[in-house]
Image (cartoon, grey):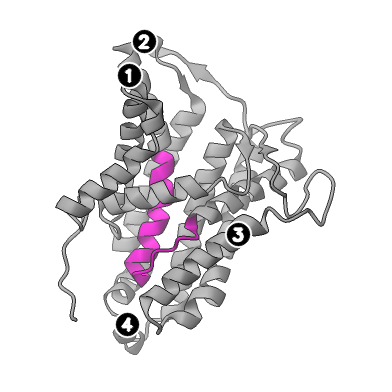
Amino acid sequence: MTEFLQHLVNGVSVGTIYALIALGYTMVYGVLKLINFAHGDVYMVGAFSGLYIARGLGVDAEPSLGKALVVFVGAIVVCAALGVTIERFAYRPLRQRPRLTALITAIGVSFLLEYGFQLPPILQGEVPFPPGPTPRFFPEPFARVDYEPFGVHISNYDMVSLAVAVGFMFVLQYIVYRTKFGTSMRAVSFDASIAGLMGINVNRVISWTFAIGSGLAAAAAILVAGSRPSINPLLGLLPGIKAFVAAVFGGIGNVQGAMVGGLVLGLAEEYVSGYLLSSYRDGIAFALLILVLLFKPEGLFGRARAEKV
């Protein structure tokens, strides 16, 4: 029983990270109907942004909750700005083009971030940029505290990750369904041209959507980097793909679906690796994707929509 509960805790811990990244996929797709495959690499940029801010604050020598909050918010701001920049210069000029064009561009932006961060550093010292291919150590933003109720190991990082993911989900639900901006988002999602005729600033809505989604990816990156401290420029490749699977599994475009999809994927990975073979851990995500596409293509919480052809 203890082993089962330990796998449950580990699965929820990983699943909350997938959920946070999947929320970003869901928001962008809900408004633009675009799969932003660069989202996983924005997550990577969030980790390195947090590293540079942490080094500048001297977190290595004196970690504290206040410094951790500055690192957390700073990384979110950096990635929000990056998301807006990507949308403005990579996606907006292609908005009236076929969707395949934007999809290929998203893949190109993803490779640009991944391999751009592996270039030889121009700035040397404690914070080289680009960081180069060498993995970097991410300092713990605040002191780790471990608990063992009933023999199950739980850290304060696990609890913070879950609280942050659930908190962001409720905040997003409130924004989407209870605010004027959320009404504008849903209008743009339904028909951007009609929303523009009704006085909604479509470009502003889309930019803010990218900012929020990219900020969520940064939040996930800091939570992961703080507890699993080795980071590198390919850090976001696999988590980004898995978070996309989680978003599709829950019903891409649905906030609750992204949250549930992330948790289900994290638990599935943990139990498969714990009771079957650990080498199947990464494959389970794609097995779930195939099953969903076969039996419920719109996802658990998604709705089938008729499209004009």
Magenta segment boundaries in residue numbering:
16-39
Callout 4: few (<14), some (14-19), or many (20+) C-alpha neighbours within 10 Å? some
- Identify the element where label 1 is drawn: helix
Q: Earlier in the sequence, mark 2 or mark 4?
A: 2
Q: How many marks?
A: 4
**Residue hosting label 1:** 5
For the residues labelled 1 and 4, the Cα–Cα distance comes to: 49 Å
Circle 2/circle 1 CB separation < 8 Å:
yes
Residue to which mark 4 is pinned: 195
Q: Nearer the viewer, residue 83 or 131?
A: 131
| Inter-mark Cα distance, 1 to 3 | 38 Å
Per the image, the residue denoted by label 3 is 113
Q: Quick one: label 3 or label 2, which is nearer the N terminus?
A: 3
Distance from disc 2 to disc 1, alpha carbons, whole Å, reads: 9 Å
Q: Secondary structure at mark 4?
A: helix
Report the residue at 81% width, 57% height from top. 122
Give the number of the mark in front: 1 or 3.
3
Question: The N terminus appears in which quarter of the rendering?
Answer: top left
Q: Indicate yes or no whether the magenta region holds residue 35.
A: yes
Disc 3 crowd rating (10 Å Cα; few below 14, some 14-19, many 20+) is some
Residue 240 covered by magenta stretch = no
Q: Which of labels 1 and 4 is toward the front?
A: 1
